[in-house]
Amino acid sequence: MRAEQLLFVATRRATSAVTLTVSAVVLTGCADADLAQLEGTLADIRQSPGGQPPVMAVALPENQDLSYLYSDGRSPFLPPDEIAQDSADRGEVALAPDRQRAPEPLERFSLQELRLVGTMRMGERQVALIASPDGNVTSVKEGNYMGTDYGRIAQINAQEIRVNERVFTQPEGWQERQVSLVINENSE
Protein backbone atom coordinates (compact mmCIF):
# COMPACT_ATOMS: atom_id res chain seq x y z
CA MET A 1 0.00 0.00 0.00
CA ARG A 2 2.94 2.25 0.64
CA ALA A 3 4.11 1.79 -2.93
CA GLU A 4 0.71 2.92 -4.26
CA GLN A 5 0.86 6.10 -2.20
CA LEU A 6 4.34 6.89 -3.46
CA LEU A 7 3.23 6.33 -7.05
CA PHE A 8 0.26 8.63 -6.52
CA VAL A 9 2.43 11.40 -5.02
CA ALA A 10 4.99 11.07 -7.82
CA THR A 11 2.24 11.29 -10.49
CA ARG A 12 0.77 14.31 -8.82
CA ARG A 13 4.13 16.10 -8.67
CA ALA A 14 4.78 15.33 -12.32
CA THR A 15 1.36 16.76 -13.28
CA SER A 16 2.04 19.91 -11.25
CA ALA A 17 5.44 20.36 -12.85
CA VAL A 18 3.97 20.02 -16.37
CA THR A 19 1.19 22.52 -15.54
CA LEU A 20 3.73 25.00 -14.14
CA THR A 21 5.94 24.69 -17.22
CA VAL A 22 3.00 25.22 -19.63
CA SER A 23 1.84 28.26 -17.64
CA ALA A 24 5.32 29.80 -17.73
CA VAL A 25 5.53 29.33 -21.50
CA VAL A 26 2.09 30.88 -22.03
CA LEU A 27 2.81 33.85 -19.77
CA THR A 28 6.09 34.59 -21.49
CA GLY A 29 4.07 35.30 -24.62
CA CYS A 30 2.37 38.13 -22.74
CA ALA A 31 5.68 39.74 -21.80
CA ASP A 32 5.70 42.30 -24.59
CA ALA A 33 8.57 44.76 -24.63
CA ASP A 34 6.20 47.53 -25.87
CA LEU A 35 4.21 47.95 -22.64
CA ALA A 36 5.50 51.49 -22.40
CA GLN A 37 2.92 52.63 -24.98
CA LEU A 38 0.06 51.09 -22.93
CA GLU A 39 1.36 52.68 -19.73
CA GLY A 40 1.55 56.07 -21.47
CA THR A 41 -2.06 55.84 -22.67
CA LEU A 42 -3.26 54.89 -19.18
CA ALA A 43 -1.32 57.82 -17.67
CA ASP A 44 -3.02 60.23 -20.12
CA ILE A 45 -6.45 58.88 -19.18
CA ARG A 46 -5.68 59.23 -15.47
CA GLN A 47 -4.58 62.86 -15.88
CA SER A 48 -7.64 63.97 -17.89
CA PRO A 49 -10.48 65.64 -15.94
CA GLY A 50 -13.33 63.37 -14.87
CA GLY A 51 -17.08 63.90 -15.23
CA GLN A 52 -19.39 63.75 -18.20
CA PRO A 53 -18.05 63.86 -21.74
CA PRO A 54 -18.84 67.03 -23.69
CA VAL A 55 -22.27 67.04 -25.34
CA MET A 56 -22.34 67.80 -29.04
CA ALA A 57 -25.57 69.69 -29.79
CA VAL A 58 -26.81 69.71 -33.36
CA ALA A 59 -28.39 72.96 -34.46
CA LEU A 60 -31.94 72.46 -35.75
CA PRO A 61 -33.47 74.67 -38.43
CA GLU A 62 -36.01 77.21 -37.24
CA ASN A 63 -39.73 76.40 -37.49
CA GLN A 64 -41.60 77.92 -40.35
CA ASP A 65 -45.30 78.61 -39.90
CA LEU A 66 -47.36 77.23 -42.73
CA SER A 67 -50.85 78.41 -43.53
CA TYR A 68 -53.48 75.83 -44.46
CA LEU A 69 -55.31 77.12 -47.50
CA TYR A 70 -58.43 74.99 -47.04
CA SER A 71 -59.21 75.74 -43.38
CA ASP A 72 -62.43 77.53 -44.37
CA GLY A 73 -63.71 74.48 -46.28
CA ARG A 74 -65.64 71.55 -44.82
CA SER A 75 -63.88 68.98 -42.70
CA PRO A 76 -63.05 65.81 -44.64
CA PHE A 77 -64.21 63.83 -41.59
CA LEU A 78 -67.79 65.13 -41.74
CA PRO A 79 -70.39 64.34 -44.42
CA PRO A 80 -71.00 66.96 -47.11
CA ASP A 81 -73.68 69.51 -46.22
CA GLU A 82 -76.07 68.20 -48.88
CA ILE A 83 -75.96 64.66 -47.56
CA ALA A 84 -76.39 65.82 -43.96
CA GLN A 85 -79.31 68.05 -44.97
CA ASP A 86 -80.96 65.26 -47.00
CA SER A 87 -80.77 62.80 -44.14
CA ALA A 88 -82.26 65.37 -41.75
CA ASP A 89 -85.05 66.07 -44.28
CA ARG A 90 -85.86 62.37 -44.54
CA GLY A 91 -86.36 62.12 -40.79
CA GLU A 92 -83.52 59.65 -40.60
CA VAL A 93 -82.65 60.66 -37.06
CA ALA A 94 -86.20 60.24 -35.78
CA LEU A 95 -86.59 56.75 -37.30
CA ALA A 96 -83.13 55.46 -36.44
CA PRO A 97 -83.30 52.61 -33.90
CA ASP A 98 -81.95 53.01 -30.40
CA ARG A 99 -78.70 51.04 -30.53
CA GLN A 100 -78.01 51.64 -26.84
CA ARG A 101 -81.07 49.57 -25.84
CA ALA A 102 -80.39 46.01 -24.66
CA PRO A 103 -81.68 43.51 -27.27
CA GLU A 104 -84.63 41.30 -26.35
CA PRO A 105 -84.51 37.48 -26.82
CA LEU A 106 -86.64 37.35 -29.99
CA GLU A 107 -84.43 39.89 -31.78
CA ARG A 108 -81.94 37.12 -32.56
CA PHE A 109 -84.34 35.66 -35.15
CA SER A 110 -85.81 37.11 -38.33
CA LEU A 111 -89.61 37.50 -38.42
CA GLN A 112 -89.80 34.73 -41.05
CA GLU A 113 -88.37 32.29 -38.49
CA LEU A 114 -90.85 33.23 -35.74
CA ARG A 115 -94.39 31.79 -35.49
CA LEU A 116 -97.43 33.19 -33.70
CA VAL A 117 -98.88 30.20 -31.83
CA GLY A 118 -101.54 31.93 -29.73
CA THR A 119 -102.88 35.03 -28.06
CA MET A 120 -104.59 35.53 -24.72
CA ARG A 121 -105.94 38.35 -22.63
CA MET A 122 -104.46 38.87 -19.17
CA GLY A 123 -106.58 41.49 -17.41
CA GLU A 124 -106.59 44.56 -19.62
CA ARG A 125 -103.52 43.46 -21.55
CA GLN A 126 -103.38 41.30 -24.70
CA VAL A 127 -100.42 38.86 -24.80
CA ALA A 128 -99.09 36.85 -27.77
CA LEU A 129 -97.18 33.57 -27.65
CA ILE A 130 -94.30 33.36 -30.15
CA ALA A 131 -92.47 30.13 -31.03
CA SER A 132 -88.80 30.57 -31.97
CA PRO A 133 -86.61 28.18 -34.00
CA ASP A 134 -84.74 27.06 -30.86
CA GLY A 135 -87.99 25.46 -29.58
CA ASN A 136 -88.87 28.06 -26.95
CA VAL A 137 -92.23 29.80 -26.67
CA THR A 138 -92.03 33.39 -25.46
CA SER A 139 -94.88 35.64 -24.32
CA VAL A 140 -94.76 39.19 -25.68
CA LYS A 141 -96.86 42.31 -25.23
CA GLU A 142 -97.26 45.56 -27.14
CA GLY A 143 -94.02 47.51 -27.11
CA ASN A 144 -91.72 44.46 -27.05
CA TYR A 145 -89.14 44.05 -29.81
CA MET A 146 -88.73 41.07 -32.11
CA GLY A 147 -87.01 40.28 -35.41
CA THR A 148 -83.64 41.39 -36.74
CA ASP A 149 -84.97 44.62 -38.28
CA TYR A 150 -85.71 46.43 -35.00
CA GLY A 151 -89.36 45.32 -35.10
CA ARG A 152 -91.59 46.67 -32.33
CA ILE A 153 -94.98 45.13 -31.59
CA ALA A 154 -97.61 47.80 -32.30
CA GLN A 155 -100.84 45.82 -31.85
CA ILE A 156 -101.99 42.37 -30.74
CA ASN A 157 -105.35 41.00 -31.92
CA ALA A 158 -106.95 37.60 -31.38
CA GLN A 159 -105.53 36.17 -34.65
CA GLU A 160 -102.53 38.37 -35.50
CA ILE A 161 -99.90 40.78 -34.25
CA ARG A 162 -98.69 43.86 -36.12
CA VAL A 163 -95.02 44.75 -35.99
CA ASN A 164 -93.42 48.03 -37.10
CA GLU A 165 -89.93 47.33 -38.45
CA ARG A 166 -87.20 49.87 -39.20
CA VAL A 167 -84.99 49.13 -42.18
CA PHE A 168 -82.20 51.18 -43.72
CA THR A 169 -81.92 51.68 -47.47
CA GLN A 170 -79.21 53.81 -49.04
CA PRO A 171 -81.33 56.21 -51.07
CA GLU A 172 -84.11 56.75 -48.49
CA GLY A 173 -82.31 56.19 -45.16
CA TRP A 174 -84.31 54.70 -42.27
CA GLN A 175 -87.82 53.68 -43.26
CA GLU A 176 -90.63 52.12 -41.26
CA ARG A 177 -92.68 49.20 -42.58
CA GLN A 178 -95.56 47.23 -41.09
CA VAL A 179 -95.50 43.45 -40.97
CA SER A 180 -98.09 41.04 -39.53
CA LEU A 181 -97.74 37.60 -37.98
CA VAL A 182 -100.91 35.53 -38.24
CA ILE A 183 -101.85 32.34 -36.38
CA ASN A 184 -101.55 29.46 -38.82
CA GLU A 185 -103.85 26.70 -37.59
CA ASN A 186 -102.71 24.25 -40.32
CA SER A 187 -99.08 24.19 -39.14
CA GLU A 188 -99.76 21.75 -36.26
Image (cartoon, helix red, strand yellow):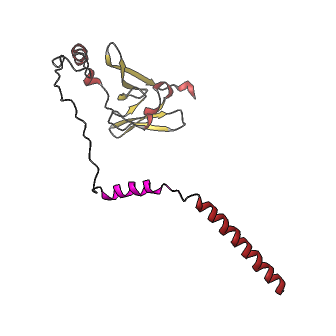
| Quadrant in the picture for the N terminus | bottom right
Could you tell me residue 48's position as x and y percent? 29, 55
Residue at screen point 56% across, 26% down: 187
Q: Position of residue 22 (x, y in %)?
A: 66, 64
Residue at image coords 25%, 36%: 58
Picture coordinates of residue 155, whole percent (x, y): 35, 28
Q: Quadrant of residue 14?
A: bottom right
In the rendered image, the vertical position of residue 94 relative to residue 41, given as above or below: above
Q: Nearer the viewer, residue 105 or 62?
A: 62
Q: Quadrant of residue 10?
A: bottom right
Give coordinates of residue 67: x percent, y percent: 16, 21
Residues drawn in magenta: 32-48
Tell me which residue sits at (36%, 29%) in the image: 153
- Image-quadrant location for residue 16: bottom right
Q: Nearer the viewer, residue 121 or 134?
A: 134
Based on the picture, tell me whether residue 41 belongs to the magenta stretch.
Answer: yes
The residue most toward the front is: 33
Q: Is-magenta flag for residue 44?
A: yes
Q: Residue visible at 34% across and 55% down?
A: 44
Of residue 170 and residue 62, the one placed in the foreground of this image is 62
Dominant secondary structure of the magenta stretch?
helix
